Amino acid sequence: MKITRDLIEKLPKTDLHLHLDGSIRMETLIELAKDGSVELPSYTVEGLKETVFKSNYKDLDDYLKGFGYTCAVMRNKENIERISYELALDNQNEGVRYIEVRYAPQLHAGGRMTMLDTIEAVNNGLGRAKHEFNIREAVVSGKEPPFEYGIIACAMRYFNKYFSDYFSDIVSVHSYSPEDKIFGLASLEVVGAAVQARREMGLPVVGVDLAGPEKGNPPIHHREAYMLAQRNFLNKTVHAGEAYGPESIFQAITELGAGRIGHGTSLFKPETISDPSILDRDRYVNDLVQFIANRRITIEVCITSNMQTDPELLRLEDHPFRKMLDNKLSCSICTDNRTVSHTTVTDEVFKAVNAFGLSLNDVKTLMVYGFKRSFFPHAYREKRAYVRQCMDYFERIVDNSI
């Protein structure tokens, strides 16, 4: 059968790589900026699309400029809760039944707002949207699967005192320490907050992430933080291979124990390997691919975002997603940043279908990976039942569309 965008929108989907500060509604950003006296280059949606949230970006640095504006309006609990609530609604409205919202608490903490305050605000917004969705008759009756979510706390590979009040404080307090030690300490604090939020507050913090520039900021600086996460049963994902070579992916897995990799676009690029000790680069890539495949390490694929930040990707067909599929890697289609990339999960799947000739069975496999490889916040028995319910719903949608 023909896979239409309308069909994809109806299917139960996941988004495992979803940045809160990159997915704020532009109308909300404008309203909150006016209320908080935050200066924007434009106060219309059309103007922001021309100046900040563009269709095309020069590179990753250009892509990231918009986050300075979104983070500026996320300085209090009320705003963070509203943005989280609206993000959940936007996903529900296109058939996404499970999301993992990630963000860096330290970018928003400071003054009277702690990291735990920010986590609680995110949960309040997502939880309110979940409650409203799950009391619908179709969900209560079991005809449709409920909406679920998890929260991922991001640590930063690199920061300086200008990133936020929190980062300014930590840099000032440790002004005589080497940068890498400060970065590692900040990551340890993020994980500590995530552990406390989960254990003492009962919030669905399901994992930790490491984001920021890879080059010159190796994951080893954050190993202690990731070991703390492991000792407290938090799941681990890492941005890797987005703007650096395959060895960055290897380090994320072997030094931090990542169970999922964000982006991984350089996986099949032996020419980007910078480690001089790796002599046979083609073999290294092949061994790494097999290493990932055998351990079912899932790659969080963000096609549109990658096309916007990697100048070498001129056509959708150039994206390494095709090679990932050919090598039977576990992949999940994600948005990365709904606003910055002007996309939805439906858009991303539809692009993949058209660019890579995916069959309905291929789409189902991707959906299964999304649900199965999620950091589901409830018991494993419940997760299995939830995955089964979602895939049964998938089949009913398909049957009704024939």
Image: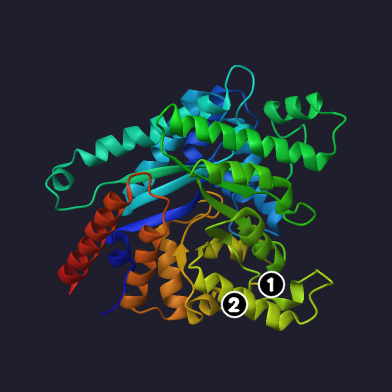
According to the picture, the residue beneath numbered tag 1 turns out to be: 312
The residue under label 1 is which amino acid type?
Glu
According to the picture, the residue beneath numbered tag 2 turns out to be: 318
Q: Say few, some or many: other residues with alpha carbon within 10 Å of mark 1 (under 14 / 14 to 19 / 20 or more).
A: few
> Residue 107's quadrant in the figure?
top right
Q: Residue at x 71, y 60 (%)?
A: 58
Picture layout, residue 274 above or below residue 223? below
Quadrant of the drawing holding the C terminus: bottom left
Mark yes or no: residue 163 visible: yes
Of the pair 140 and 218, the residue shown nearer to us: 218
Of the pair 333 and 9, the residue shown nearer to us: 333
Mark yes or no: residue 315 visible: no
Q: Say few, some or many: other residues with alpha carbon within 10 Å of mark 2 (under 14 / 14 to 19 / 20 or more).
A: some
Picture layout, residue 177 above or below residue 96? above
Of the pair 92 and 203, the residue shown nearer to us: 203
The residue under label 2 is which amino acid type?
Asp
Percent coordinates x, y for residue 81 in the rendering: 44, 30
Name the element at disc 1.
loop
Q: Residue at x 71, y 31 (%)?
A: 167
Percent coordinates x, y for residue 311 in the rendering: 69, 68
